[in-house]
Image (cartoon, rainbow, N blue to C red):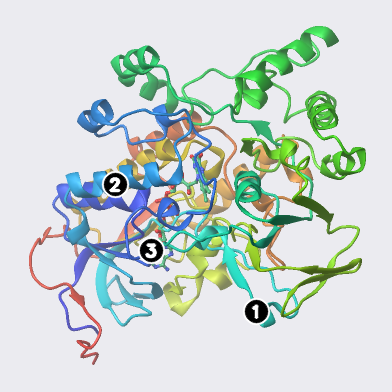
Amino acid sequence: MVDAEPLDAVVIGAGFAGLYMMYRLREDGFSVHGFERGDGVGGTWYWNRYPGARCDSEIMYYSFSFLPDLEQEWPLTERYPGQPEILRYLEEVADRLDLRKDFTLGAEVTALEFDEASGRWTLRTAQGHEATARYVVTAVGCLSAANQPAFPGAESFGGVTLHTGNWPRDPVDLAGKRVAVIGTGASGIQSIPVIAEQAAHVTVFQRTAQFTIPAENGPLDEQFVALWKQNYPEWRRRARHSAAGFPYHPSVTSAFEVSEAERRATFEAAWGAGGFTFLSGTFRDLVLDEAANDTAAEFVRKKIDEIVRDPQVAEMLKPRDFPIGTKRLPLDTNYYVTFNRPNVTLVDLKRTPVEEITATGIRTSAGHHDLDVIVYATGFDALTGPLEALGIRGRGGRSLRDAWREGPRTYLGVAVPGFPNLFTITGPGSPSVLSNMPVSIEQHVEWIGEFLSWARERPAGVIEATEQAAADWTDHVQQVAGHTLHPQAASWYMGANIPGKPRIFLPYLGGVGAYRDRCSAVAANGYEGFVLSGEESGLPGERSGDHVTRPGDHRAA
Ligand SMILES: Cc1cc2nc3c(=O)[nH]c(=O)nc-3n(C[C@H](O)[C@H](O)[C@H](O)COP(=O)(O)OP(=O)(O)OC[C@H]3O[C@@H](n4cnc5c(N)ncnc54)[C@H](O)[C@@H]3O)c2cc1C
């Protein structure tokens, strides 16, 4: 085994989730160490530095609620903060809480093995670090495993290849370049208008036309900010008990309770205001009822006709094969209008698929596009991808990948039977990507922290979700999704963007508030659905000593 002393816990990842989990466990007296693949903290906002990268949650509530001083001091500049600003925020959090010393950076976890005799996990990184710990908390994010499609000949391309989810730290100069953007999901939609302003020419390779709603980004009014800051506790409380972690009430009106003219005026007002209220704030049944959904979808298609001058291009941009809101709804700044620019070409990959990538560009069935840069805006192997990449082996040496061959089975999205003492922040089966994530992350971190403190007081070295609890929860997650239009879309929520991935609805649609209540009830009932076993109790909460072996320092027995 490993030479260093065992830890109480390891945390993997240093984004919103990992930073807060580290702080909670450290403050609660656990010995804990973190491992992060990146050379800096920030997670999503460390990696996604592409032109136009910004948040779709408004700045007022895309932040932690447990830092009241920072909440008051942090400037709320524009409605949707850009990547550099969010990264600065998370770096500030890490510095204020003195968290950097608790993480090993540049350390990619590739193996996590559970030892049934000791009830402990052994962690290994690609860089040669090793550690053993009673508990593992994964804070690896839902959108951190970049999806790189395998086009024939991709490695032969002689120009620059980039992925939005793994953008270089040094700025990339696209001036005068012929750039391809492959993919029109949220990252493509944010980056295409900005790249088009910089590059000589942009060719957009679209597989699926997308609905997108204007962000209407802009500076925030000082008085509005002052008022918001005065009422922060109340906004936070509302977000915690809401459907999606936003502090606003969703609409309670059906799209068919109003006249056609009123409906159009409602959509028009929401379109003008910008943001997600187009879906949640207009009518309550848009993702529940096909006819209601059609009214919103048709409104957006008409907007595309109004905005895009070339009718053929407008037609190609109109989504027709999934209900609006059943794929992640992007917010944009100037997306559709960008296709009026003379330096932008749209290629419909359904009509003219990619045949190969060559040394000088991309060949589709309609011809060759000469290129200097290829940008993959092809998203992520969402939710399960980052977890399966950890090389997790639980009881009997069974891999998580194998256990999830038919799709992930979790209890509350935080625990997996057969993988004791392992907790997954925003894992599959939790509200995660269907919510304003800092709200969900805080709830998970606090719940896991309280659970571990509770277990420390008891003679229980091993905590494990039961098969039955996980089966019931997984069924419930699918049933809730089945009451909506979501399963109709070939979305990444369904795993449909990754060849061979099981088609199962990954996040929990039951709402952030209801989910929180359920987790609280589980805790109040003595953590029902979990079995606690093993003689060894109470972790000593050691806080000193060398708990991690570093590269060149292993003396594995
Ligand atoms: C472009 C973009 C825009 C987004 N906009 C919004 C938004 O508007 N609102 C919203 O709520 N959410 C948004 N999200 C989701 C966003 O991921 C979350 O809001 C939040 O940042 C997640 O924090 P996290 O700590 O859970 O995960 P992450 O920020 O993804 O951090 C996970 C960390 O784990 C590390 N890691 C992963 N695997 C390993 C490994 N094997 N070994 C070591 N380290 C590992 C990663 O390097 C990463 O740093 C967006 C995501 C993207 C990609």
Q: Earlier in the sequence, mark 2 or mark 1?
A: 2
Up the image or down, 142 lies above or below 476; here it is below
Specify the farthest residue to the front.
Answer: 176
| Three-letter code for the amino acid on which mark 2 is drawn | Tyr
Foreground: disc 2 or disc 3: 2
Q: Disc 2 to disc 1, how far (Cα)?
A: 42 Å
Foreground: disc 2 or disc 1: 1
Residue in the foreground of this view, choosing between 218 and 544:
218
The residue at which mark 1 appears reads as 158
| Three-letter code for the amino acid on which mark 3 is drawn | Pro
Q: Earlier in the sequence, mark 3 or mark 1?
A: 1
Q: Disc 2 to disc 3, how far (Cα)?
A: 22 Å
Position of the N terminus, as image quadrant, is bottom left
Q: Mark 2: is the Cβ under 8 angstroms from ligand 1? A: no
Q: Disc 3 to disc 1, how far (Cα)?
A: 47 Å
Q: Identify which residue is drawn at 74% across, 29% down.
A: 288
Q: Are marks 2 and 3 in contact (CB under 8 Å)?
A: no
How many C-alpha atoms fall within 10 Å of the one at disc 3: few (<14), some, or many (≥20)? many
Q: Position of residue 128 (x, y in %)?
A: 31, 82
Residue in the foreground of this view, choosing between 442 and 302:
302
The residue at which mark 3 appears reads as 420
How many C-alpha atoms fall within 10 Å of the one at disc 1: few (<14), some, or many (≥20)? some
| Three-letter code for the amino acid on which mark 1 is drawn | Gly
Q: Can residue 258 be spotted in the picture?
A: no
Query: In the figure, is residue 233 to the left or right of 164?
Result: left
Residue in the foreground of this view, choosing between 255 and 277:
277
The residue at which mark 2 appears reads as 20
Q: Identify which residue is drawn at 28% across, 71% down.
A: 120
